[in-house]
Amino acid sequence: STMTTETANALSNPAPQKWDGKTMTQNDFMIRDTVLVLSPSDSVIGSESKKASHEFTPSQPRGVLHRAFSVFLFDSSTNELLLQKRASTKITFPNVWTNTCCSHPLHGMEPSEVDGPEDVKDGSVIGVKNAAVRKLEHELGIPVGELKVEGFKFLTRLHYWAADTITHGKKSPWGEHEIDYVLFATVPSKDVLTIKPHPDEVDDIKWVTQSKLLEMFDDKSLLFSPWFRLIANRWMIGSTSEEGRGGGWWDDLNRTMSTDDFCDFDTIYRFDPPEEHMGGGGDAGPMFEKEDIAAVVGDASKKQGAYGKVKTHKESKLKQILHLEEVMSAVTLLYVLPLKSNLKSDNIQKTFDSSDLAFCDEILCKVSRSFAAVIRQLPPTLLVDVLIFYLVLRALDTVEDDMTYFPSNDEKVKALLSFHKTALVDPKWTMVGCGEGDERRLLEEFPKCHSVYAALPEASRRVICDIT
């Protein structure tokens, strides 16, 4: 990238050997911190001052793309997340609530904070984790060593941009344009953690449960960083319906930290900001394809599936009761001659894992009550085969219908065409954040369906795979 005057000055007058956040002002950081300039594929292609990379001008409407990280620190004993409120003295995005710590790996640091493609591929990203340890000490006063580098869990990357229009107005000269590395970490109890927030960095901190965070999101008097809302709503918090609760990274923190089930080191998810964060000094508009714009946080209208999402014609209770023939049929079906499921047959119970089969039956009834009534009446020798076939097609349909999950149509088509090679082959395959409600839960707990699928006769598996 073209070197600005600020960067030239910073490099000709290098900072001390040891980066010392205690003696540097916000302006010092803007001039002397040297961020990692990136290509859209996340290759490090240069350097730039923090100031120059965050300037939104006509010549660079979205600043300069650079690497960042977002740390989410949890108390595993209470499942609470540590939030910080960025200080009012911050130049970019002051006064907003956000995740535990968000900042940038830098050039010239010891230990190194620069990761290459091989580090991303194996998920180690030691450079980003070193940067996280440094900034957690600087912003929150957490001593180096209390949180071990190896204790951070790298989950995925997102490419987003946002003008700081809330602070500086529609023509804001500042904003973010980053490929953000998402890191999770846990402590056994908040009581064992030393926290002394730096007053120039943090105005407040708060440990919150999921329900408390959702309440805060609904409070219009509170400001939140756009990247935090995006990550929380897209990946961290699963379905919030009473029937379909669960499925996000935060919903099963132990699984998130102890397995790679939710890790995606290959994909860079790309998002344009919500409307209020477009613009800036360069009048920046949408950057990605139309389909990507739908990935704005909270755009549930673009997520299809789940009962209750589509408006339906309704009649009053009185009018419904006046349809006497339908009422009598319903009473007969529910109480006089109720339908009985053939899933209880001895052969089925002996062949399939009872817990996984119970999940498949439950989710079938959730995603389609009418099909469930028919499928459960099938002969035991055919019932489970058709049940799984239906759930596989429903999962595939959910992937196809979600207009927000994939960064482009090409990525979606690729996932659809390979579905039979991924979901039906890998017993641990799952897709987090796609769809809504029970359809989303189906994808996020798909290994249970795979368990039953794998126990089907080979001929049945071949038919399901061929048609899928």
Image: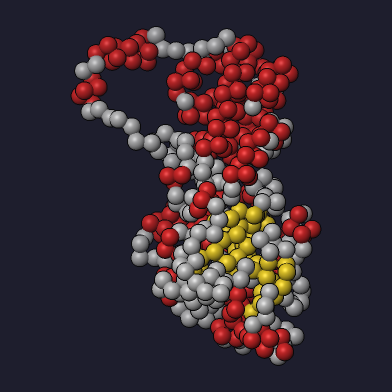
Percent position of residue 70, x then y: 60, 64
Percent position of residue 209, x then y: 48, 55
> Which of 7/33 is in front?
7
Q: Residue at x 23, y 20 (%)?
A: 321
> Which of 150/168 is in front?
168
The furthest residue to the right = 118
Q: Residue at x 68, y 19 (%)?
A: 463
**In the rendered view, would you say 12 is above or below 434?**
below
Decide if residue 3 is on the left or right side of residue 83. Answer: right
Q: Residue at x 60, y 78 (%)?
A: 52
Q: How is the image coloured?
A: secondary structure
Decide if residue 317 is on the left or right side of residue 390. Answer: left
Q: Quadrant of the N terminus?
A: bottom right
Q: Quadrant of residue 133?
A: bottom right
Please state the total of marks drawn on the protein image: 0
Percent position of residue 351, x then y: 68, 18
**In the rendered view, would you say 331 is above or below 38?**
above
**In the rendered view, would you say 123 is above or below 326?**
below
